[in-house]
Image: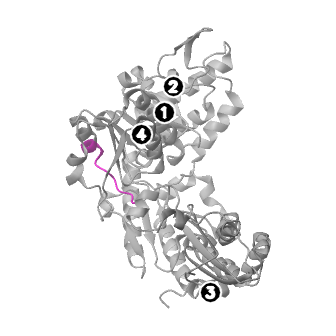
Amino acid sequence: MSSQMYREQIIDLYENPLNYGDLEPADFAYEEDNPLCGDVIRIAVRLDNEGRVADVGWQGQGCAISQASASLLTEEIRGLTVDEVREFPKERLLELIGVPLSMARVKCALLSLKVLKAGAYGIPDPQELRGD
Amino acid sequence: MLDVQQIRQDFPILHREVRPGVPLVYLDSAASSQKPRQVIEAMNGYYRKQHANVHRGIHELSESATAAYEGARTRIARFINAPEPESVIYVRNATEGINLVAQSWGRANITTGDEILLTEMEHHANIVPWQMLAAEKGATIRWLPVRDDGTLNMDRLGSFLSEKTRLFAFSAMSNVLGTINPVQELVAAAHGVGALALVDAAQHVAHLPVDVQALDADFLVFSGHKMCGPTGIGVLYGRHELLEAMPPFLGGGDMIRRVTFDSFIPNELPYKFEAGTPAIAEAVGLGAAVDYLSEVGMEHVHAHERSVTGYALEALSEVQGLSLFGPPPNQRGGVATFAVPGLHPHDIAQLLDEEGVAIRAGHHCAMPLHQKMNLPASARASFYLYTTRDEVDRLVEALERAKRVFRIGV
């Protein structure tokens, strides 16, 4: 059986992530971990004066699927309004990842979207709450 | 020595293919072991010929079910050398056994300022029930440190025990590092300050001969499903006088002698702690599992595992870039936990699965230990009486392939 789940693009993104890094100041930011596997992702978003995503940075660690998903998602949301980000369909992200995922790995794949939406809905940034 | 090929004949599942043309290499027995046909057939036979509710019916089937259920208890008691069957309480698993002690003995005996000593290598099952109790009672939890080599820091044990310590609860064998702890010594140290000792033997009972009287344990818990038995059944062993003095845990049928509109009188041991219709077929299955393991001989199980584990640790240490955790083979059970920089444990497990190799990836229900080791997660291969050296070779080949997929070391 070929490693369908690990096509070249996923591994390329794992090694050379897109939009990786901190964003200061940001209009909203959020982070969360997936305690099952120890994946953690933080996403920070800056909006332009029309309220569209102008810049986005993410940081994290974890498996190839979760990390590649964050690169793909952050590429995709530039120019979207906050409402569009809130409505971003998970099917679209899975389509971008483009490889068949087992049930357990769908969680890894969708962690970035969960984090992004939590930020877009204005849930307080856990890092701010911790004060670090 | 046991004949591993003959043993494998007893385990039907080991002969299946994961996918067409890909035979199963099951290296996740520390999470749950596979079942020999003797256990499967015992449960099947019970349902086909013996089942009725226990302890109440005045009819042939109920008496036969009761005899099967209680007969299993007697054999399990003998398997761990408990002084009498009444000190073997059936629970769902080791987790429930610990919760029972925490909620029954703990709530009656722990007060503000008391200390509960745990070790840094505990499974969440032996952490969270004590955190719940400590929060309720204002008690303090202390942690005996684990050294870098994966063994407990015995030099510091004395400084963690005092007259404030009411209980020392520890794992006999770490599910992450495989470390076999010096149970007798740890129990004696607890007794030395007047504390009780609870032994989490979930890994231990499956892999080594256990004698609760020689260990002098006050409480000892284990799960059936890790030792060739079914899920849904486990054991709390307790010293008779402690169990006798403890209040009931769950209330309901079977655990009472008499109920009035005003109150109840609890039943005698072990029924005081077995409310409701129990897991009868599962108890029968666990009885068959201890018969099976006794016939093979636990010393043979342990010797086989030690040999396979030694072989695996050597083979894995030759995989470039792989780091192994835990003590040397002579101090550990059948567990090899490792990490490969640049390759997340989940990705390792997924790629190994493509080759039919089943391992565990994650924190193995021991998040504090992973924090201490500064690892978000690890990969764990675990071995049992049916594991062969060929399977270890397939693990290593699959790991090399996973590294190639991730372009590590090429």
Q: Is residue B180 magenta?
A: yes
| Disc 3 crowd, CA 10 A, few/some/many (<14, 14-19, 20+) | some
Residue at left 56%, top 52%?
B34
Name the residue carrying label 1: B100
Amino acid at pointer 4: Ala
Residue at left 54%, top 56%?
B8
Q: Which colour scheme is used?
A: one colour
- Give me the disc on residue B273: 2
Q: Are marks 2 and 4 on the same chain?
A: yes
Image quarter of residue A112: bottom right
Inter-mark Cα distance, 1 to 3: 50 Å
Q: Report the front residue among B114 and A101.
A: B114
Q: CB atoms at circles 2 and 3 under 8 Å apart?
A: no
Numbered disc 4: what chain? Answer: B
Q: Position of residue B262 (x, y in %)?
A: 59, 9
Q: CB atoms at circles 1 and 4 under 8 Å apart?
A: no
Image quarter of residue A28: bottom right
Per the rendered image, the range of residues in magenta is B177-186
- Left or right relative to B57: residue B119: left
In this rendering, the answer to whether B375 lies above or below B12 is: below
